Amino acid sequence: MASLLRSISFKIFGMAVLLLVMLAAASVWSASSSQSVQRQLETLSRSLFPLVGALNDLRDITRQQGVTAKFSTTTPDATAVAACEVDARSEASAGKIVGFRAEAARALGARISALERDRMKLQRLEPMIAELRFQHLRLSRLTLAACRLEATPVELAYVQAQADDVMRLSAAVDTEVKAYVTEIGLAVTANQEQAMRANILMIAVATLLGMPLAWLVARGLTRPILRLQAGARAVRDGQLDQANVTVTTRDEIGDVSRAFNAMVIELKEKDRIKETFGQFIDPRVVSGLIEGGASATGGEKKLATIYFSDLVGFTGLGERLAPSSVVALLNAFFSDMTGPIREHNGIVDKYIGDAIMAFWAPPFADPATQARAACTALLAQRALLHAFQARVPDIVGLRRDVPRIDFRAALATGEVVVGSVGPNNARSFTVIGDAVNFCSRLEATNKIYGTKMLIDGATADMAGVTIATREIDTIMVSGKSEPMVIHQLAGFADSLPADRADLFGFYAEALAHYRAGNWSAAEAGFARALALLPDDGPSIALLARCRQLMAAPPASWDGVWRLATK
């Protein structure tokens, strides 16, 4: 209880309650005055002013009726009589309408008046307005009668006398109403002054209580907040070890300080998670999943460059080595081969046995350069392979019969779905689509052509002139209805040996003959290529295929080689 009484929240709450009570009282007072002013102004605008206007209109009509009655005597003919009767009836109707207006305005005022005395005053006007309406009706009848031919001066005198009576009654009612208007005006002024005093009081109370409260809060918060500020700056600078805030109070600021320290601990834990899982999943994906950003959202179609690689002869290798040596060898290989992928903005999707699957796609890679980045990463992997082979004896603990490590890889570019896939308790951030399936089959196609790095035509086109490739063949894989042009990834264009250019030229010429069905010329061209490089896998494969086709020519030939198996 004592700590509660010392807390800033209790002090602020107590001061706020006192301030609210005083402000509420002043607000009620001001609201009451404002409501009274509003009701009185409404009575003026909706009742009394319209009533005064109706009385003025009635007096104008009364004067006109007197003029109408005199006109019939000054112009005694049938036309004048007819005009007089029309005017008299029109003025009688207008007078009735004005009388109704006056009574309606009075009745409305009696209903909406703020004070009982005001309603009683308006009730006293009811018989006066009723008498005024009756006398005006009588005046209208006398005026209509005076319009006939040969009206006597006595009858005109009756009309004038009746008009004077209506004028006197109207003036009496007008005097009463104007007195009431003056009284309400004074009351409105008084109520406005009262409301102003209430507002001034509220401002004074807020000032007198707000300044001490501000001083109290500032005194209690300044030093702890400065410590929090220093901690926040340390977090901003990434110095989490220096971000802890010393807690010196037991109030709300102390709670905030403890919460800040808990946040720092959580940030340290997130960094630890990123560091730990970054060994298994790409850190950019881990970061996206932890922060709940774009990487954690559902699938989205994107143009991606897919990568598959596989160790050569891994099955036999697993039979020769102890399980621990196999795991150590795979871990070392994956570690070396993953580096170039991540360095060139690729995402390692998964490790499947001895295979690696990766991809390049927005937002992790620039779509304009992702194919070139993928080719560069694959070439970097090949460059690292020799150094890795030199480390294999130490990794597996063998000095004789050391296995020779090599791998095949493929790249394919196409539209895929990128996103988090799987049940809620076992999701995986991956890519799905025909390009993925084709790349997996293209990696296996290396075995047919004796190559180590195959890429599809889309990847070769997007990679640009800085990447040297050789068009190998046009194939159609199982399950696809469209042929695909495949290329061998040869290296960087500016560092390709001169003899490779000659080899690629012979091969391209032979490939053209092969596609045209001129297999004897193709056979000679592939033989010329093998003369330059006897172990050139594509030349060996297509030379054997040319001989096979010459031995058993197909019924139709379109230059596309159909792969029978996946």
Image (cartoon, helix red, strand yellow):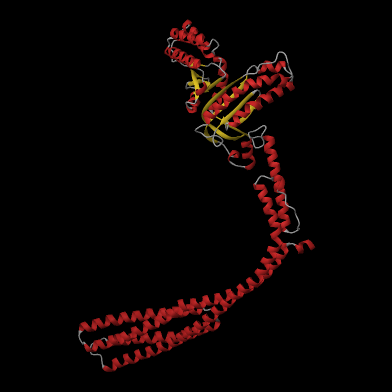
Relative to 272, residue 318 above or below: above
Foreground: 352 or 362? Answer: 362
Q: Position of residue 348 (x, y in %)?
A: 61, 30
Quadrant of the image for the C terminus? Answer: top right
Q: Is residue 78 left or right of residue 494?
A: left
- Seen at 68% across and 56% down, the residue is 226
Residue 78 visible in the picture: yes
Residue at (71% x, 13% y) in the render: 401
Q: Which residue is the extreme one toward the top?
A: 551
Q: In the rendered image, which quarter is residue 410 located in?
A: top right
Give the percent coordinates (x, y) of residue 484. 48, 21
Decide if residue 290 is on the left or right side of residue 108.
right
Quarter of the image for residue 129 reads bottom left
- In the image as oriented, which residue stretches furthest toward the right? 2
Q: Nearer the viewer, residue 28 or 139?
A: 28
Image x and y of residue 560, in percent: 47, 16
